Image: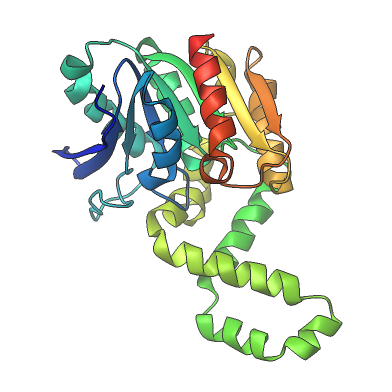
């Protein structure tokens, strides 16, 4: 079997989409997280390529896909994946696929399953975004403040470490600074998660709709991840009554890279089971 990665591009109505591909057999579409691109899935795809036909697109506005000057939304990303699958349908010779998504990608995957249930065999959702939890609005506001804060302010704060240390602020300042740097590289994620109008983001949250998902669902969550991520995974498990929630004891954030062997095994067992 050919286990070499292939890469392709396709021109969609909104822009060009890039994807990585490996393996043969049952089709799995991997949707990357907020602060990453399709390369996030390389290790996992290599581990399961013997059993599955794996596809990992860069979402529109990420990685090697096009960055069109459009208004980004979850539904726009869903429609891009729908166009991609429509194009691949003849090559796949399958009417249904499995969707695996991380954080933002999990939000898109669940939204896709709600809009096109006839195309989905099952979902694996890693630390999914896209539901309302306690303190959600404050979380969005905090992320907006970190993004808008000028880099010069962070540099000044870090210069005054002896003073900030007295007030126990050093760790928070460093954490915000690292997140600020990450945000600069992923403007589309920032727009989707917290830069749009609040009512628009609210309208795309899924807590009122998740009970309508009928396909099998596995939720994976790192036990050492932040409390907001853990709360959202628990909310997904609560709203999707038949979903199985598995906690990975040593997992933090970015499970596809930090816990690749465990995640690959869970995906294999979920689909084959």
- Where residue 266 appears, as percent x and y from the top left, is 57, 24
Q: Can I make out residue 148 in this image?
A: yes
Give left or right: position of 249 versus 14.
right
- Where residue 139 appears, as percent x and y from the top left, is 65, 54
- Where residue 207 appears, as percent x and y from the top left, is 60, 28
Give left or right: position of 171 versus 84.
right
Q: Quadrant of the C terminus?
A: top right
**Residue nearer the viewer, 105 or 146:** 105
**Residue nearer the viewer, 217 or 25:** 25
Q: Quadrant of the N terminus?
A: top left
In the image, is residue 133 above or below residue 266?
A: below
Check the image and name the residue furthest to the front. Answer: 1
Residue 22: image quadrant is: top left
Give left or right: position of 128 versus 45.
right
Q: Residue at x 25, y 48 (%)?
A: 65
Give left or right: position of 127 versus 224.
left
Q: Can I make out residue 208 in this image?
A: no
Residue 129: image quadrant is: top right
In the image, is residue 148 above or below residue 203?
A: below
Q: Residue at x 59, y 72 (%)?
A: 177
């Amino acid at each position: 079997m050919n286990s070499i990665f292939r890469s392709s591009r396709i021109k969609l109505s909104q822009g060009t989409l890039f994807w990585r591909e490996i393996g043969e057999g049952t089709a799995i579409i991997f949707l990357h997280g907020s602060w990453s691109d399709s390369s996030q899935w390389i290790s996992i795809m290599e581990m399961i390529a013997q059993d599955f036909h794996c596809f990992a697109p860069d979402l529109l506005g990420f990685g090697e896909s096009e960055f069109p000057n459009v208004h980004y939304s979850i539904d726009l990303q869903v429609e891009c994946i729908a166009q991609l699958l429509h194009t691949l349908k003849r090559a796949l010779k399958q009417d249904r696929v499995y969707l695996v998504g991380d954080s933002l990608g999990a939000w898109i995957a669940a939204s896709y399953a709600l809009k096109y249930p006839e195309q989905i065999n099952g979902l694996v959702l890693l630390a999914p975004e896209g539901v309302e939890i306690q303190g959600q609005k404050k979380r969005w506001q905090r992320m907006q403040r970190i993004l808008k804060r000028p880099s010069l302010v962070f540099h000044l704060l870090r210069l005054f470490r002896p003073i900030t240390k007295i007030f126990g602020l050093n760790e928070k300042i460093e954490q915000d600074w690292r997140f600020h740097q990450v945000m600069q590289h992923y403007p589309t994620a920032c727009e989707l998660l917290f830069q749009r109008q609040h009512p628009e983001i609210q309208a795309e949250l899924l807590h009122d709709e998740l009970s309508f998902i009928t396909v099998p669902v596995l939720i994976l969550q790192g036990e050492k991840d932040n409390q907001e991520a853990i709360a959202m995974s628990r909310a997904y498990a609560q709203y999707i009554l038949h979903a199985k929630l598995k906690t990975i004891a040593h997992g933090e954030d970015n499970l596809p890279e930090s816990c690749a062997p465990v995640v690959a095994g869970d995906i294999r067992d979920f689909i084959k089971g």
